[in-house]
Amino acid sequence: MNQLSNKNDNFFERVYEVTRLIPFGRVTSYGAIARYLGSARSARMVGWALNSSVNQKEWVPAHRVVNRNGLLTGKIHFPGQNTMKELLESEGIKVENNRVVNFEELFWDPNVELG
């Protein structure tokens, strides 16, 4: 069990590192982060990592990670009902009906951007 915990902690740390690289005013998806980390089927695990990101010493901009369709599926894990939306809008990202408007244009793909 200890090895699994350490492995997850390491994965979570890698998720935080990538998430911290998402530029202001851009968004990515759970799946894009998972693919970049070599774990294409681990999008849900990326979500779990981001749910725990509030416990990190260094800030993790988890609000910049949405689902593959641009939906704010992680919003329930933020302190207020509209916190995720407000954080995105403070960066100039328009959100309508809990979906990032112009998602494709704002999408930041770590595989492309980080190589």
Image: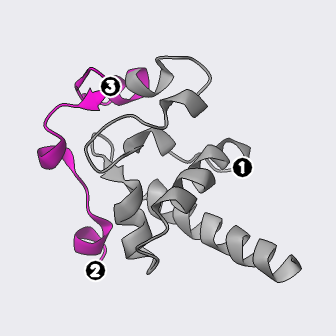
Residue span colored magenta: 86-115
> Which residue is the site of mark 1?
57
Residue 73 lies in the magenta-colored region: no
Mark 2, secondary structure of its residue: loop
Q: Quadrant of the C terminus?
A: bottom left
Give the image quarter of residue 2: bottom right
Residue 103 lies in the magenta-colored region: yes
Above/below status of 32 relative to 50: below
Residue type beneath disc 1: Lys
> Which residue is the site of mark 3?
98
Q: Is residue 16 toward the left or the right of residue 105 in the image? A: right
Give the image quarter of residue 1: bottom right
Residue displayed at 31% across by 67% down: 110
Q: Is residue 58 toward the left or the right of residue 39 in the image? A: right
Mark 3 or 2, nearer chain start: 3
Residue displayed at 13% across by 37% down: 102
Q: What's the mark number on residue 115?
A: 2
- Count neighbours of disc 1 (C-alpha within 10 A) and say few if under 14, some if 14 to 19, many if 20 or more: few
Nearer to us in this view, 55 or 78: 78
Q: Nearer the viewer, mark 3 or mark 2?
A: 3
Above/below status of 8 relative to 105: below
Mark 3, secondary structure of its residue: loop
- Residue furthest to the right in view is 2
**Where residue 52 sits: x, y (%)?**
68, 48
Q: Nearer the viewer, mark 1 or mark 3?
A: 3
